[in-house]
Image (cartoon, rainbow, N blue to C red):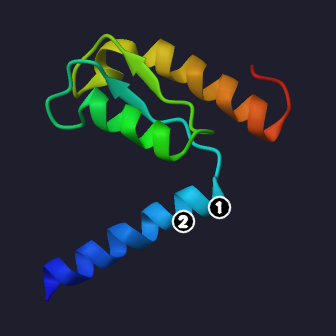
Amino acid sequence: MQVEFHSQTVGDVEVFYRVAGPADAPVVGRNDPHFLPAGALAYQRDVPQAEVILLDTGHFALETHAAEIGAAMRRFLTTHLGGDPR
């Protein structure tokens, strides 16, 4: 029963992203063994407006790339919400 619910929920989420197309900018480490870059790129194919950001890091990207992630977040929010990026 739980697997069926999970499968339906995942399907609903995928449909939402494809149809609604919300602004999205997932940050993924190229060397992350849990969230693979291939998955992020597949997501970008499904949601073309997504701005997938691949960094040369692993799973704990904030520990090594906080400045780059912060800058990417500022650019993304400025683009989609307007205002001063500082």
Tell me if 3 is positioned left or right of 74 in this view. left
Q: Residues within 10 Å of mark 2 (few under 14, many from 20)?
A: few
Tell me if 52 is positioned left or right of 77 in this view. left
Amino acid on which the number 1 mark rests in the picture: Ala
Image quarter of the N terminus: bottom left
Q: Which residue is mark 2?
A: 16
From mark 1 to mark 2, how far is it between C-alphas? 6 Å
| Residue 37 found in image quarter | top left
The answer to whether 31 is drawn above or below residue 40 in the figure is: above
Residue 30 location, x and y as percent?
28, 18
Secondary element at image label 1: helix
Residue 86 location, x and y as percent?
75, 19
Residue drawn at 64 percent across, 52 percent down: 22
Secondary element at image label 2: helix
Amino acid on which the number 2 mark rests in the picture: Phe
Q: How many marks?
A: 2
Q: Residue extending furthest front? A: 45
Along the line of sight, which residue is nearer the eye, 25 or 48?
48
Residue drawn at 43 percent across, 72 percent down: 12
Tell me if 52 is positioned left or right of 32 in this view. right
Q: Are marks 1 and 2 in contact (CB under 8 Å)?
A: yes
Disc ID at residue 20: 1
Residue drawn at 61 percent across, 62 percent down: 19
| Residue 43 found in image quarter | top left
